[in-house]
Image (tube, grey):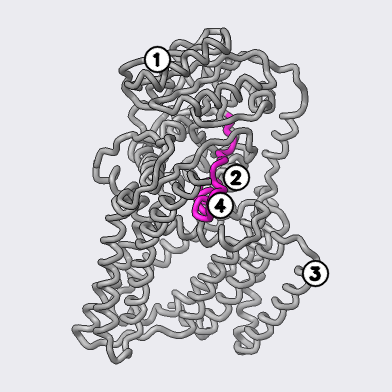
């Protein structure tokens, strides 16, 4: 079996490296939209192609050209069938398919080795698993932060036209504004922005729940009275269910003639056309919600806050709107409009959910309703200014989708007779729930590598790694960075510092993601914590306390690295050396938490001084 595969596996790695570079270069070039740059990169591409071809044998060249032809045919057929891809997207998809075929060929080249050790069935199972996951990745990869390069966004364009058709449609909209122990001046600023709405048929319900300090909610109540009859304030001393409980309370007291519900967080300053722009879409009675992008206004005080801004907002600006193209979008809590009767029909907000917003979309989809997400900025709020507050928010946003998976997995697998979810919706919900799994799997894999390395050292066994694999891995790392630079350019961000701080922020929050995934899986209760919006003073102690677990974890991995590298003193074991280096890098990743936490605390002093 597989005897027909006679291609040198190292040549496969060379070609795979070329494909990774080609994909990254294409993304970067098309993000610049400069003809001169495109010509230069085209010349570079031909040079790399020539260099790669010079390494290969004649038979290998024919083999890989055949693979690329197959990838092109598959991508073109999918593009025609789905109608989703741009010309660039079709080309990128062809590269992805060819890369998968190359890596499949590389895996198959190890077949005889596995058979020789009696692992034939395990090998076949791994290959089949890789094929299934690769097909999934191929189909759904465009719905990512690279979506603007792949997708035509036909539905978004069509709906954008609907937004501007007329100004006749004016159903009654009730705005729900929940708040709990918020600074009154922030809530008042939000209320004043609502007053400027370019829409007449609305009312506002401010629901303040569980705020014990009367000095916080009394000024808001007074301001609502001053703004007039459209603004209704309700203070409830004791109310369960956190934000979802407050929204359900507001829903129950909403007037019967209300058709649409808009949800706005207490810190958001909205644009006058927020409602007017989207009500036309609700002429379709099956539309359950419209969601606009999260955006923020307090990020320009430092590089670390700018990195946090891009880390927070890129998903909402690029990836989530792409879900609309396959009717798999979901709500994200604020700056959304919902149809009241559908909200009531599905049972309102789930008061047990950590992410009551996206959970609501699951039940709407299950009953056959649709929702749309737009990248438009029609309101801006506040990013948390301390690392501890960032961790609380990200912990909730990570654990909530996992909680949804545990609750709704029967819907996703089609075990409910009342379920009207499409296959795309089911797959995208599973993807949403498992999107933060990568750090968990990486941590487990790294510990396995450490145990294997200890075994190799104790048995004095050498496990070498081909330098071609090292080259391929480096190309993957560089390609990932270049691709990140490419989609940052789509936001007119051409500086490298925001990209670097975006990456540092992601590393700093790794342990939070790990805990957010593991906690629901093991039934560990997570409290629904509000995001603090009061101004903080600088605290070095808080910086360390917020990152102490990550500092301990970094120490553990630095110890692993030292033990493996010192034990591999002769440098003969490639695998042990690589594991030691990876452990060192992982230690640096965890140490990013202390770095970010300290910078944020320092920024509080700097921002306050200015």
Report the Cα–Cα distance between label 3 and label 2.
29 Å
**Are the two marked residues, 3 and 2, in contact with CB atoms closer than 8 angstroms?**
no
- Look at mark 3 in the image and give the residue it sits on: 36
- Closer to the chain start, of discs 4 and 2, is 4
- Look at mark 2 in the image and give the residue it sits on: 317
Q: Nearer the viewer, mark 4 or mark 3?
A: 3
Find residue 595 and report its image quarter.
bottom left
Marking on residue 376: none
Marking on residue 144: 4
* Identity of the residue drawn at 53% across and 36% down: 381
Left or right: where 538 falls relative to 227:
left
* Identity of the residue drawn at 37% across and 22% down: 245
- Closer to the chain start, of discs 3 and 1, is 3
Report the Cα–Cα distance between label 4 and label 3.
28 Å
Find residue 532 and report its image quarter.
top left
- Look at mark 1 in the image and give the residue it sits on: 235
- Closer to the chain start, of discs 2 and 1, is 1
- Closer to the chain start, of discs 3 and 2, is 3
**Are the two marked residues, 4 and 2, in contact with CB atoms closer than 8 angstroms?**
no
**Are the two marked residues, 4 and 3, in contact with CB atoms closer than 8 angstroms?**
no
């Amino acid at each position: 079996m597989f005897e027909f595969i006679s291609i040198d596996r190292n040549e496969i790695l060379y070609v795979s490296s070329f494909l990774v570079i080609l994909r990254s270069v294409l993304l970067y070039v098309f993000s610049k939209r400069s003809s001169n740059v495109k010509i230069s990169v085209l010349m570079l591409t031909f040079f790399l192609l020539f260099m790669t071809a010079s390494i290969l044998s004649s038979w290998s060249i024919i083999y890989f050209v055949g693979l690329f032809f197959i990838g092109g045919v598959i991508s073109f057929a999918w593009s025609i069938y789905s109608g989703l891809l741009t010309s660039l997207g079709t080309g990128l998809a062809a590269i992805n398919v060819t890369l998968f075929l190359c890596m499949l060929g590389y895996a198959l080249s190890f077949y005889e080795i596995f058979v020789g050790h009696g692992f034939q069935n395990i090998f076949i199972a791994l290959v089949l698993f890789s094929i299934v996951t690769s097909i999934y990745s191929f189909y759904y990869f465009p719905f990512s932060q690279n979506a603007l390069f792949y997708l035509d966004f036909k539905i978004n364009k069509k709906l954008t036209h609907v937004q501007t058709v007329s100004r006749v449609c004016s159903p009654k909209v009730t705005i729900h504004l929940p708040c709990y122990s918020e600074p009154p001046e922030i809530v008042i600023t939000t209320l004043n922005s609502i007053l400027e709405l370019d829409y007449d048929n609305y009312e506002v319900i401010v629901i303040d729940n569980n705020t014990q300090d009367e000095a916080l909610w009394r000024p808001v109540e007074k301001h609502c009275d001053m703004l007039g009859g459209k603004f209704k304030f309700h203070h409830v001393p004791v109310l369960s269910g956190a934000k979802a409980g407050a929204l359900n309370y507001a829903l129950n007291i909403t007037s019967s003639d209300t058709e649409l519900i808009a949800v706005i967080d207490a810190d958001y300053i909205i644009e006058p056309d927020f409602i007017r722009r989207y009500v036309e879409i609700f002429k379709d009675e099956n539309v359950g919600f419209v969601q606009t992008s999260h955006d923020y206004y307090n990020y320009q005080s430092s590089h670390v806050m700018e990195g946090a801004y891009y880390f927070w907002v890129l998903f909402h600006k690029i990836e989530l709107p792409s879900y609309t193209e396959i009717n798999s979008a979901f709500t994200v809590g604020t700056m959304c409009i919902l149809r009241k009767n559908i909200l009531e029909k599905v049972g309102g907000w789930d008061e047990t959910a950590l992410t009551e917003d996206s959970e609501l979309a699951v039940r709407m989809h299950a009953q056959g309703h649709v929702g749309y997400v737009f990248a438009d900025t029609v309101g801006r709020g506040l990013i948390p200014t301390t690392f501890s507050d960032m961790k609380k928010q990200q912990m909730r946003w990570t654990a909530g989708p996992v909680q949804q998976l545990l609750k709704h997995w029967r819907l996703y697998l089609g075990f409910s007779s009342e379920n009207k979810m499409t296959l795309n919706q089911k797959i995208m919900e599973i993807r949403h729930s498992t999107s933060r799994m990568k750090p968990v799997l990486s941590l487990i894999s790294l510990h396995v590598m450490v145990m294997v390395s200890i075994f190799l050292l104790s048995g004095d066994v050498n496990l070498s790694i081909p330098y071609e694999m090292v080259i391929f891995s480096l190309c993957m790392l560089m390609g990932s960075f270049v691709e990140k630079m490419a989609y940052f350019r789509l936001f007119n961000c051409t500086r490298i510092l925001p990209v670097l701080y975006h990456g540092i922020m992601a590393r700093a929050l790794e342990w939070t993601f790990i805990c957010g995934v593991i906690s629901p899986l093991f039934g560990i209760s997570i409290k629904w914590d509000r995001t603090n919006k009061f101004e903080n003073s600088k605290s070095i102690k808080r910086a360390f306390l917020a990152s102490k677990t990550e500092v301990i974890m970094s120490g553990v991995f630095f110890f692993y690295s030292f033990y493996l590298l010192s034990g591999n003193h002769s440098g003969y074991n490639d695998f042990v050396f690589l594991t030691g280096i990876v452990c060192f890098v992982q230690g640096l990743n965890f140490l990013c938490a202390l770095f970010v936490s300290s910078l944020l605390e320092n920024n509080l002093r700097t921002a306050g001084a200015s």
